[in-house]
């Protein structure tokens, strides 16, 4: 049996093939339905950190899969994987906070 993987992001919308200019990457675009955009704004907005900094963002990432197809994902700041990542980053920074460099 294969193990089910959990991710910290969700696939959304439609991603177009990248545009090239003189053989070099120029840009890539993606489209969302209004319902997808509303869901992203309702569910995936980042919260400020403990100091009240940051927050209020929805992070989209366009990427190419191993099969060569392009996708867009939105970070889910409420996922267990993302929360675990943030906790490990906080633990790293607090354990090395007294280093002079």
Image (tube, grey):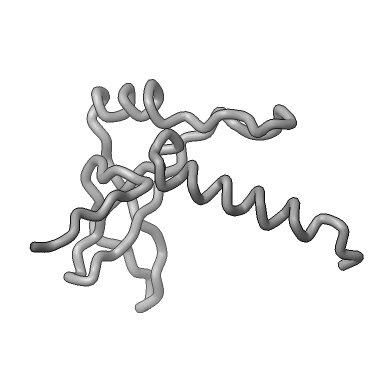
Percent position of residue 59, x then y: 46, 42
Count up the numbered dots: 0
Please state, as top left, top right, bottom left or bottom right, where the N terminus lies in the image: bottom left
Q: Is residue 2 left or right of residue 19?
A: left
Q: Is residue 6 left or right of residue 4?
A: right
Q: Residue at x 87, y 67 (%)?
A: 101
Seen in the picture, residue 46 relative to 100 is either above or below; the reply is above
Percent position of residue 11, x then y: 26, 45
Q: Which quarter of the figure has residue 97?
A: bottom right
Q: Residue at x 41, y 31 (%)?
A: 44
Seen in the picture, residue 40 relative to 19 is either above or below; the reply is above
Q: Is residue 40 left or right of residue 89?
A: left
Q: Residue at x 41, y 64 (%)?
A: 26
Seen in the picture, residue 38 relative to 60 is either above or below; the reply is above
Q: Of all residues shown, which one is farthest toward the left?
A: 1
Q: Is residue 86 left or right of residue 29?
A: right
Percent position of residue 46, x then y: 52, 32
Q: Residue at x 26, y 41 (%)?
A: 12
Q: Which quarter of the figure has residue 99?
A: bottom right
């Amino acid at each position: 049996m294969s193990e089910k993987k959990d991710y910290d992001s969700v696939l959304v919308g439609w991603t177009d093939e990248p545009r090239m200019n003189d053989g070099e990457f120029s840009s890539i675009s993606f489209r969302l339905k209004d319902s997808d955009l509303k869901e992203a704004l309702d569910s995936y907005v980042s919260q400020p950190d403990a100091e009240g900094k940051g927050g209020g963002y929805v992070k989209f990432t366009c990427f190419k899969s191993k099969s060569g197809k392009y996708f867009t994902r939105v970070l889910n700041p409420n996922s267990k994987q993302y929360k675990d990542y943030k906790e490990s980053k906080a633990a790293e920074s607090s354990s090395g906070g007294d280093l002079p460099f």
